[in-house]
Amino acid sequence: MRTQVGIVGAGPAGLMLSHLLHLAGIDSVVIERRSREYVQKRVRAGVLEQGSVDLLVGSGVGERLLREGARHEGIELRFDGESHRVPMTELTGRAITVYGQQEVIKDLIAARLAAGGQLLFEVDDVVLRDLDSEEPSIRFRHEGRDVELHCDFVAGCDGSHGVSRGFVPDGVFTTYEREYPFAWLGILAAAPPAVHELIYANHERGFALYSLRSPEISRLYLQVAADTDIAEWPDDRIWSELRTRLETVPDWTLNEGPILEKGVTPMRSFVVEPMQWKRLFLAGDAVHIVPPTGAKGMNLALADVALLAKAFGAWYDGGQDELLATYSRDALRRVWRAQHFSWWMTSMLHRLPDQDPYERQLQRSALRYVTSSKAYATSLAENYVGLPEV
Ligand code: APR
Ligand code: PHB
């Protein structure tokens, strides 16, 4: 088999890259370890920055997003028994849209298949070869057969557990990392959200987040210990803890309903530099992970591949390799802005197991400052809605 760009991974990064390349007249094949059903059902985050919405709409895959996504112009910060609104649109002129990642995945898969795109699901034993030559290839097993896919370039979009990075020699990459001593327990509930905007709550028992997916479905999260076993959290305990952490202001109650899905997500900050080696280009979670507090993961993946698609476009359109050469440097500027913002939101909102009273007071001061100073609130807002240039 032969293609121009071989793409490993059908998450937002891999699928969007394939879609943008197609629009530029460049052929690609996407190979994915899981089944189509699995990737379309995998519940993940759901906040799209204005720039991500513009990218999806501008490239012709935003029709359902515009119809079903919910535009939000502010968020609420809840602490010390009070609620404060950060009016993002008033402060920045931009907004976010809540639309589940798996919905973006469904839309992208449908668009690729409608355009005759090649997506191979349930592949195994992926091996990258000859990355330092002009004809790299990807070997894998698919439907019981060994396949060798020859390409001009390989795009490693295979997420945090991907294999692509592992085919680069030792000593090329520098890794930056931070583990947090807590995780998020997330639920999807058949309950009409009691909110119009997201609530980020700092409570002495730990962080909680109230989000939503639709007028009928709520999405909520609780900070829990890093080694939490989900079996220790029957539904009653989850609702009781959510009530304790969120029902801290007068006359406000949660809406409860059957829990449709629950899971524990570890919290990690992680960057690998550079995002390229020879003919291998890396994008999304394969090279950087942020804790979900800043809602940046999917947005970063989309921003990476927007740059990468442009760089491949320039290469195929007359052999200009300058944008490919600067891809990693340019993408990393946004990556590090998001790293700092996600770390800062995480530090301000969570309860650390060994937090001393001094740190606790600093955290409360930061929360009071960000909800009273227009300058500080604008800093939060412009990062949250996404900076156009970084
Ligand atoms: N071979 C083929 N596919 C693989 C392999 C492999 N060896 N390893 C992993 N994959 C697939 C995964 O099954 C997944 O579908 O690569 C895909 C990577 O997709 P994501 O994990 O969604 O990563 P990315 O596209 O970079 O998007 C980042 O996803 O995890 C969230 O919070 C994150 O929102 C962010 C977004
Ligand atoms: C979500 O809706 O899943 C969500 C929202 C905001 C976050 C993280 C996740 O910061």
Image (cartoon, helix red, strand yellow):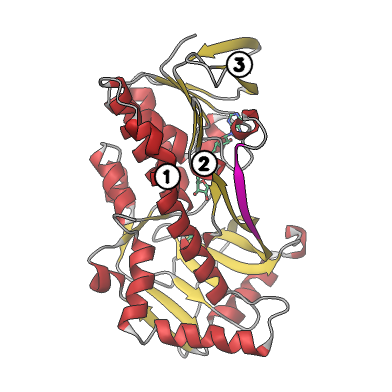
| Residue at image point 26% right, 36% down | 60
Give the CA distance from mark 3 to mark 1. 29 Å
Can you identify the residue that label 1 sits on?
A: 329
The answer to whether residue 302 is left or right of residue 339 is left
Residue 256 % position (x, y) = 54, 70
Asked whether mark 1 and ligand 1 are closer than 8 Å, the reply comes as no
> The residue under label 3 is which amino acid type?
Arg
Can residue 201 be seen at all in this image of the molecule?
yes
Give whichever of discs 3 and 1 has the lower sequence position: 3
Mark closest to the chain's N terminus, 3 or 2 = 3
The image position of residue 72, as x and y in percent, is 32, 65
> Looking at the rendered structure, which numbered label has been put on residue 139?
3
The first of marks 2 and 1 along the sequence is: 2
Residue density around tag 2, few if under 14, some if 14–19, many if 20 or more, within 10 Å: some
| Residue 263 placement: quadrant | bottom right
Residue kind at label 1, given as amino acid type: Arg
